[in-house]
Image (cartoon, rainbow, N blue to C red):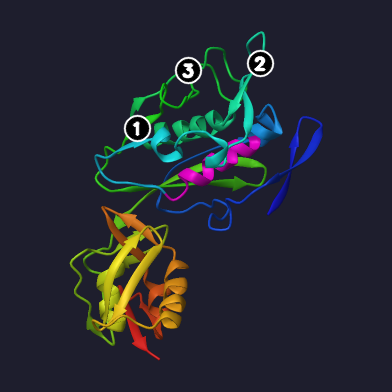
Amino acid sequence: MRREVLIGNAIISVIVILFLTSPVMAANHDSVAYYEIPLSEAVSPNNVENAVYAARLIDGTIVNSREIFSFNRVLGERTPEHGFVIGQISSRSKYPVYDYGGGICMTAGILHQAVKSSGMQVIERHNHVAPVGYLPSGEDAAVTWGVQDYRFRNNGEYPIKIKAGLNNQSLCVEIFKVYPMDPMQLLCIDDEPLKLKNQPVIINGTTYVPLDESYHAFASREFLSCDNQDCRYRDQGKFINDTEEIKLETTISNLSTLIINGEAFAPVRELAELFGFNVYWDNSIFKVNLIKQ
């Protein structure tokens, strides 16, 4: 979609493809840190476009306990083939310097502020040669492919999830803890407890269940593979026909799938409703019950 952004005295239109899956941030009890910077602080429209695109790329990233997050690894090399445009990368030098990806340091800086607030360990951070206008001196995060990275370690007990997106005309990053489901909370199918090898997790108030195990329980179909949101199955040991396979893969790929510790997880409500189950929550005994329609 196209969004108007105020830069100085000029209103520009920026193509925003980030927010089809990333809603505007909101307060949540799982949130451990939040930071935002107005897009008007960017030095050019192209810098805004790169900053927003970088936020799209880090949005939804899960960082497991003790794992190290690398900004460069997630974004990849800043080239036009990877979706970046030429932006200003040095706004305070005598002669401005331009290169693909100029503007992504704003996103890295916002992430750094959220990481600091969360108490996680910063492993690598670099200052710009000259101060930037959007953060105090010494609080920015300069990143250059193959030279300077921004890295932090999740030193907490639980995985964390990074959410990055627009809040009105500000670019923001929010960090959530990924809590395992409370052992007292029951997940049942037709009142029978569902036994899963991988424990469900709760992220931002949504219960996620392991996709392959849950698929067996819901539809008795064999899980083949899942690469992020591209999943394949076969029905009771037999490959389903092309039409059904295309329809099924399209439906599965529309699930809000996450990869946690190498396993695919999906929201229990989305997966249950896909196979004709109604979802009921009994708050008195902390029970999620799936009833066949």
Left or right of 173 on screen, residue 91: right
Q: Can you tell which quarter of the image residue 67 is in? A: top left
**Whole-percent x and y of residue 283?**
35, 74
**Quick one: which residue is furthest to the front in this view?**
242
Q: Earlier in the sequence, mark 2 or mark 3?
A: 2
Q: Is residue 92 magenta?
A: no
Left or right of 260 on screen, residue 47: right
Residue at the disc numbered 1? 152
Identify the residue shown where x is 30% and y is 65%. Answer: 225
Res 45 visible: yes
Disc 2 residue crowd, few under 14, some 14–19, many 20+, Cα 10 Å: few
Q: Earlier in the sequence, mark 2 or mark 1?
A: 2
Element type where label 1 sits in the image = strand
What amino acid is at disc 3?
Asn
Identify the residue shown where x is 59% and y is 41%. Answer: 52
Residue at the disc numbered 2? 96
What amino acid is at disc 2?
Pro
Q: 163 and 264: which one is in front?
A: 264
**Quick one: which residue is furthest to the top in this view?**
94
Element type where label 2 sits in the image = loop
Q: Main secondary structure of the magenta part?
A: helix
As drawn, 181 above or below 139: below
Q: Which mark is residue 197?
A: none
The mark closer to the camera, 2 or 3, is 2
**Quick one: which residue is furthest to the bottom in this view?**
293
The mark closer to the camera, 2 or 1, is 2
Identify the residue shown where x is 50% and y is 23%. Answer: 140
